[in-house]
Image (cartoon, rainbow, N blue to C red):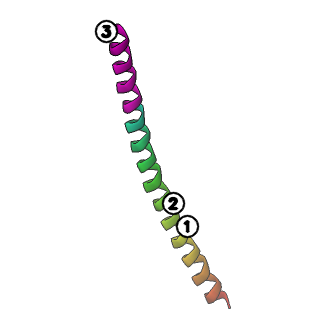
Amino acid sequence: MNHYVALSEEYAQVRNNLEISSMKNNEMQIYMMELEKEVAHRMKIMEQGNAADS
């Protein structure tokens, strides 16, 4: 019975770690999308500045 309890606790911990990792992954994906949007915005500004210089 103790073996079952230990396995159950270990399973719960692994599941919790996976949920935390999943949330962190989702946060990182959102952050990456925001960075990509910012880079695209800055590239557009640079292109407009280069076109104005020509």
Which of the two discs, 1 and 3, labels the residue nearer the N terminus? 3
Q: Is residue 5 above or below residue 46?
A: above
Callouts 1 and 2 close, C-beta under 8 Å: yes
Q: Amino acid at mark 3?
A: Met
Label drawn at residue 1: 3
Q: CA distance from mark 3 to mark 2?
A: 51 Å
User: Which structural element holds mark 3?
Assistant: loop
Q: Quadrant of residue 53?
A: bottom right
Numbered range of the magenta stretch: 1-16
Q: Amino acid at mark 1?
A: Val
> Residue 5 location in percent, x, y?
32, 14
Pick out the residue farthest to the bottom: 54
- Residue designated by label 2: 35
> Residue 34 location in percent, x, y?
46, 60
Question: Magenta part mainly helix, strand or loop?
Answer: helix
Q: Quadrant of the N terminus?
A: top left
- Indicate yes or no whether the magenta region holds residue 8: yes
Q: Is residue 4 above or below residue 15?
A: above
Residue toward you, 4 or 48: 4
Q: CA distance from mark 1 to mark 3?
A: 57 Å
Q: Is residue 36 above or below residue 8?
A: below
Q: Residue at x 45, y 47 (%)?
A: 25
Q: Residue at x 44, y 39 (%)?
A: 21
Q: Amino acid at mark 2?
A: Leu
Q: Is residue 45 above or below residue 53?
A: above
- Residue designated by label 1: 39
Q: Residue at x 42, y 48 (%)?
A: 27
Q: Is residue 13 left or right of residue 37?
A: left
User: Which structural element holds mark 2?
Assistant: helix
User: Mark 2: few, some, or many residues within 10 Å (few <14, many ≥20)?
Assistant: few
